[in-house]
Amino acid sequence: MQSSSSSQSNLLPHFRSSLEKFASAPSTFLVLHTLSPPSEPQHPPSLKTLHVLDSSFNPPTRAHLRIALSALRSTTYPKPHRLLLLLATQNADKAPKPAAFEQRLAMMTLFAQDLLDEYSASSSTKTSADEEDRDALAVDIGVTKKPYYNDKAVAIEESRQYADKGSDEQPQQVHLLGFDSLIRLLDRKYYPPDHMLAPLNPFFDRHRVRVTTRSQEGTNWGSSDDQDRYLEVLATGGAEHVGGKREWAERIEMVEGEGEDVSSTKVREYAGRKKWDEVEKLVGKRTREWIEEEGLYMVEEGKG
């Protein structure tokens, strides 16, 4: 989809209609929209890695952009690869406010356009057609009814959306998390009725997690060393009493975050005060224009 005003005007009706159909359908995961590279290969090779960026996107920020681009540019994961921006319509912790789901999906689409622009600019030196095909990137905008990471991974697989047409093999999912999301992933309160971590066994058997640490002063998570020690505790059996396994640590990659820590809450506060220059620093031009034109987060005005 191009970033023209006409195509943008169709985003809300498209996503509103798609969400209504999804709500009444039996499926628990669905891709609602795809942004493809400018020149998609005629016979794309089998997908090896599916990067999953799962967030409330309320709104998507430059922090999300850095997390995604860092993973996509990494040589750790095999290519061809693809990015899924995933929004849960049932969230374990957050109610759907203040921006409606269709608004968030529209902003995710604009965010994906920004991401593809930056990714394409850094991938413009490929030396062969095969290398170019392997590095080509498409971004999917998807929704799920599942609130927990392990169930989301199963829903994605069961949809067969990414299964190889010939072999029916599935790509490895790499879930892109902030350190706060890793804490939630390994918090046994999310796994009733036993409140043990055993439901994560299939998740870690099949998939990987890439965690971006949050090292800025004033965060609740401590220094980078403190966050690394959290993984060391897992690796040395510190979670075995609640069903965690030492080998899970081998499936978790910790990378240090770059740039200023960006909070969606801060974006909403700036938007409420109509500080558009500050908003653009945190979300980018396309998303800032959308927030302003749609009058999003005005409920925040006057707070704080």
Image (cartoon, helix red, strand yellow):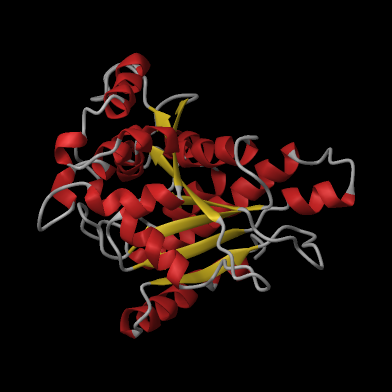
For the question of whether residue 56 can be seen, the reply is no
Residue 227 to residue 180: above or below: above
Question: In this view, which residue lies farthest toward the left?
Answer: 193
For the question of whether residue 112 can be seen, the reply is yes
Is residue 48 shown left or right of residue 101? right
Is residue 137 shown left or right of residue 69? right
Residue 6 to residue 203: above or below: below
**Of the pair 124 and 302, the residue shown nearer to us:** 124
**Of the pair 222 and 101, the residue shown nearer to us:** 222
Position in image of residue 198 (x %, y %):
23, 50
Displayed quadrant of residue 143: bottom left
Position in image of residue 253 (x %, y %):
46, 32
* Residue positioned 49% across, 76% down in the render: 14
Position in image of residue 98 (x %, y %):
26, 56
**Of the pair 252 and 124, the residue shown nearer to us:** 252
* Residue positioned 37% across, 52% down in the render: 203
Residue 267 to residue 20: above or below: above
Displayed quadrant of residue 285: top right
Position in image of residue 138 (x %, y %):
64, 58
